[in-house]
Amino acid sequence: MSVTQYEIIDGIGVIRLNNPPVNALSHALRDGICKAIKKAQKDDSKAIVILCEGRTFIAGADITEFGKPPKSPSLSDMLKVIESSNKIVVAAVHGTALGGGFETALACHYRVALSSAKVGLPEVKLGLLPGAGGTQRTPRLAGVEAALDMITSGNPVAAKKAEKMNLVDVVVDGDLELGAIAYAKSLAEDKAQLKRVRDIDIPASKAGPKVFEAARTKAAKRYRGQQAPQNIIRCVEAAVNQDMDKGLATERELFVELMQGPQSAAMRHMFFAEREAAKVLGLAKDTALRDIKRVGIIGAGTMGGGIAMNFANVGIPVTMLEINQEGLDRGMAIIDKNYSITVSKGKMTEAQKAQCLSVISGSTSYDDLADVDLVIEAVFENVDIKKEVFQKLDRVCKPGAILASNTSYQDIDAIANATKRPEDVIGLHFFSPANVMKLLEVVRGSASADDVIATSMKLAKKIGKVPVLAGNCYGFIGNRMLRPYGREAQLCLIEGASPEQIDRVMQNWGMAMGPLAVGDLAGLDIGYKARQALSDEEKGEPKTYCIADALVEMGRLGQKSGAGYYKYDANTRARINDPEVMKVVEEQAKAQGIARRDISDDEILERLTYAWINEGAKILEEGIAQRPSDIDVVYCFGYGFPVYRGGPMHYADHIGLDKIYARISEFAKQHGEKYWAPSKLLKELAESGKTFKEWAIK
Ligand code: 3H9
């Protein structure tokens, strides 16, 4: 069936688009629209309406066509055809008119939207800018500052707000097709003008150089390291200072620059990686899901409370279990405070907060979990305590209930085997703060049933998480890769670097925070306690963690004690370099017989990032992650990895696996195979000149 259809209804030429799933502007769609508009010029229709079948108006250019040879008509050619139509063209918007889709609506003479619709220019999230007039038409309608905000953030705007911003002419409820045809008819009868957005002038006085300077500074801070927001600001500046055609030429030039650059390639990779991660290989599409109507959570601490909020937010009743009322009260108070912060930011109303709180209840008796469909254990990280909890759950929970552990690194099989129903047990590893962080590692035990896995992946989406399936091993995907990364940070420290050098290198490279600052935030005692539980062999050489251990033994536990690798201002929590720490570092180096040397920024970057990559390759080799891009999703959504570098495995492909393998082999010679044994997969790919991406398409 054709992706475009044209018919005259009630005197109006209706162009109907049908290109599932999201009506992306494929070549066939662009061609069909051009042909239909041209046809309508010659018939006796009085005006034209463009509308879409399915769940949404056009959601943008077809991202799968990016990087392929362009096919005529281009999107810009198509928009010229629409804009220069001699008959009024009305866009009828439902769902989400995004990117090239909204740019199509902006090239129409009028826009009508369903009240539930949203419009937006999210290209920046793909490392791009609206390349089909969006940066030129939006400021002409909405004003410069509103346009800058909308296009640099990429956030969509609801129809009512878009109407106020002048981006939409009319908002309708009910039947969009009828509403749009009636509107087009009334415009034709009133002989309304052909309103071409390109003809609107932006008074230069409304946006002087200061507005753009302020926007540049704000974007540099908010979107640190990203090229696209800066290019967007230059385009909007061109809309003010150049005529429409010159402005469009500037937009084209800056769009192409982004499209050919590594940042957009990385961000487009992440767009598809996120969607791919939700798919479980080998699972039948029609796997029946278990119904999750009530959830139980063991432990009302910060983690348990955060997890509970995810379910309450979508109206799923949650029972939180604690050992005593005091613990429950403390947990409920934290939840209340978290919701109040959301309300104070204007992201939730008091009524919505009350609604969420009303579905969270507390209990101190396991018997109250008899009816839940899913229970998530979030107690102290000790496998024996967890096993005890699961034995109790096995006794009280109804048959078919999913029993999940929020452990960050313990053996899921050991926990599952404490029950008589290991097939119902799974890991659901949330990241702190659990009500904010998007990542959810779904950890499959060796006995986890298919429907338990499928239900967990689906439920994750329902509560707004990005799920990634992981196999069972110490630390799963994310925390397992964190160990060699942390190890290299410690070794760079003792061999010659300072905490601020290491953190600066990683932060300037794009990490949300450097590894030592993260340690201070999480609490240095956590790693200390976890190391105490390891065997000597697992702990590694004494030199590795001696500085971290010494700091903890001095009472420097990180931010919570006012000092760790840094000192912290008691009022502002500002990080302050501390000469005391350097004394500890030097003492420990001396005690270990290490002569400290100058370490270059490049060496720090290579050692830390290649440590991730080597471990990531081993994770793939062992089948712990389903695909390289899943590891990228884990790191970008859970560990503050810069999305414009596309995750560790995409970054590795970008650098070149042969180069990385050669460097890791050198590290192995210098520092020993114990730490730097190259992954077999990495070696194989480096030698055959392949990338992780190519390997994944085997
Ligand atoms: C652009 O327009 C550039 C122009 O300015 C200038 C050019 C010169 N293309 O997300 P979902 C697929 S850049 C191709 O799971 P939802 C997606 O991969 C574009 N495919 O559904 C998935 O496939 P699969 C600017 C696309 O309901 C399926 O559709 N626009 C595209 O949760 C379902 O997607 C954007 O950045 C596309 N443009 O959310 C919008 N979009 O089933 C990007 C989606 O095989 N899209 N697919 O995994 C979105 O934000 C969401 O998909 C949307 C629907 C909100 C529309």
Image: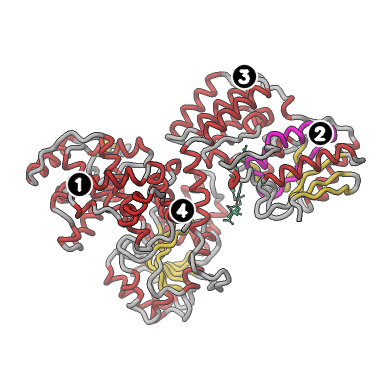
Q: Disc 4 to disc 3, how far (Cα)?
A: 41 Å
Circle 2 residue: 85
Q: Are marks 1 and 3 in contact (CB under 8 Å)?
A: no
Circle 3 residue: 241
- The mark that comes first in sequence, 2 or 4, is 2
- Residue 294: percent from the left, percent from the top? 51, 70
- Which disc is residue 667 wearing? none
Check residue 199 for magenta coloring: no
Pick whichever, 672 or 197, lies toward us: 672
- The mark that comes first in sequence, 4 or 3, is 3
Check residue 95 for magenta coloring: yes
Please state which amino acid type lies under the numbered disc 1.
Arg
Query: Based on the displayed image, in which of its 4 quarters is residue 106 positioned?
Result: top right
- The mark that comes first in sequence, 4 or 1, is 4
Disc number lying in front (4 or 3):
3
> Helix or strand or loop: what does disc 1 sit on?
loop
Up/down of 146 relative to 475, above or below: above
- The mark that comes first in sequence, 3 or 2, is 2
Q: Residue at x 43, y 50 (%)?
A: 637
